[in-house]
Amino acid sequence: MNIIDGGITSPLGFKAAGVRCGIKKDKLDLALVYSDRSARAAVAYTQNKARAAPVEVMMKDNPKTLRAFVINSGNANALTGPRGIEDAQRMRTQVGQFLNIDQMEVGVASTGIIGRFLPMDKVSAGISQAIKELDRGAEPNIDAAKAIMTTDTKMKTFACQVNLRDGTLVTVAGMAKGSGMIAPAMRTLHATTLSMITTDARLDRDPEVRWQAVMDSSFNVINVDGDQSTNDISAFMANGAAGGMAADDDGAFWEAVLWVAKSLAKAVAIDGEGATKLIEVIVTGAKDDNEARAAARSVVASNLVKAAVFGADPNFGRILAALGNSGSDFDISKVRLRLSNGKSVTLFQNGAPLIIPGSNDETVARSILHEKRILIELDLGVGSGRGEAWGCDLSYEYVKINASYTT
């Protein structure tokens, strides 16, 4: 796998645009991604039962192929009743008509403030402008990625290339947004994170099962604030423009897809609202991989753990309490808890604490927790399962941002 400097249009056959339509003041707020041919698709959706209108529209049709995806930011089109459904459908219809493609092959997503109607005159004008500006390259990659941002402080794009078994070079690229209301649990057929991954690899089968596995090892194991969004959507499009053999069973290809998804997910975690540190949790020795992921996510989701990391407080009891609430099996007499970042220190092992207040180990632990990236390693001592999760600390700034979100 070769990591490249690219974005959503890096795979062959894809174009994109990001424009200002006026939902937000003086910022890009509408993105459009387009494939010059039908792409096999898989879409994962939020499990929040108060789903936004575009999620309802997408779930109803659950498209297996896509040609385009339109995304607006600044307004979530959530809890907007029948009008919201009509507006989301109207966005699909307009893109389909202007691009002369079946509206059933148009995806739609929204992100932003909940409970406000879309200004459809502005959205319609933005769609028209975006279609005129569709292109490939660095500028449309950047514009599209910026157009889906809300409280994000950083643009999130990644791309890589990999050779299939027959030597065909394929490209995988993605963009995402997410900063607050982040605790995805997206399911296919059933996040606010919005993400899209494109590839020019050829697939001969429905990628839904593979895409769910990618979700479960990337976006579904991040946590910023424990609140699952009404709008989470993560889409995958494979248009086959690179030619060559089908990549359905090519392990290297799916590793590349997973790398892009994980990179985007970590970027969302570190860009959490008010975040100052990235928390990475690696769990080993679990009964199976699913239990390992559940344990890791429980730790990064704990507000007490997040607050302790923000304050550089090596309070191992909070981590073990979060483990105990995860539902995963473990043997406390065999559990090992360690903090790492270049240097490392073991806080708990064989059923007893190894860190003493005022000791050199406590000093090392505090110094690790002052870093921008903190690795928490947990061995559960009951099997060979392994899993990871990523989150961020809980800072004073998070409260400030969310205390005045709509103003």
Image (cartoon, rainbow, N blue to C red):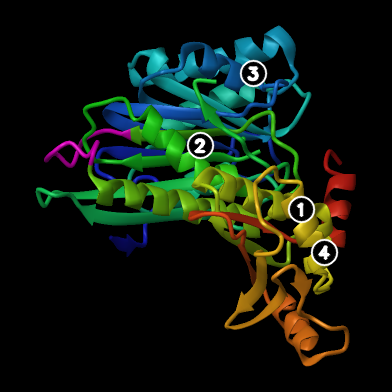
Magenta stretch holds residue 117? no
Name the residue: 11% across, 40% down. 244
> Which residue is under mark 2?
31
Q: Earlier in the sequence, mark 1 or mark 2?
A: 2
Q: Nearer the viewer, mark 4 or mark 2?
A: 4
Q: Earlier in the sequence, mark 4 or mark 2?
A: 2
Q: Amino acid at mark 3?
A: Ala
Q: Quadrant of the N terminus?
A: bottom left
The answer to whether the residues at label 3 and label 4 have Cβ atoms under 8 Å apart is no
Q: Amino acid at mark 1?
A: Ala
Q: Nearer the viewer, mark 1 or mark 2?
A: 1
> Which residue is under mark 3?
53
> In screen coordinates, is 254 left or right of 304?
left
Per the rendered image, the range of residues in magenta is 238-249
Q: Nearer the viewer, residue 317 or 159?
A: 317
Q: Nearer the viewer, mark 3 or mark 1?
A: 1
The Cα–Cα distance between marks 1 and 4, rounded to whole angstroms, is: 9 Å
Report crowding for label 1: few under 14, some 14 to 19, many 20 or more residues within 10 A (C-alpha). Answer: many
The Cα–Cα distance between marks 4 and 2, rounded to whole angstroms, is: 45 Å
At numbered mark 4, what does the secondary structure look like: helix, strand or loop? helix
> Which residue is under mark 4?
317
Q: Earlier in the sequence, mark 3 or mark 1?
A: 3
Q: Amino acid at mark 2?
A: Ala
Q: Is residue 139 visible?
A: no
Residue furthest toward the top? 82
Name the residue: 70% across, 36% down. 228
> Which residue is under mark 1?
322
Magenta stretch holds residue 248? yes
Q: Nearer the viewer, residue 299 or 1?
A: 299
Name above or below for residue 402 compared with residue 109. below
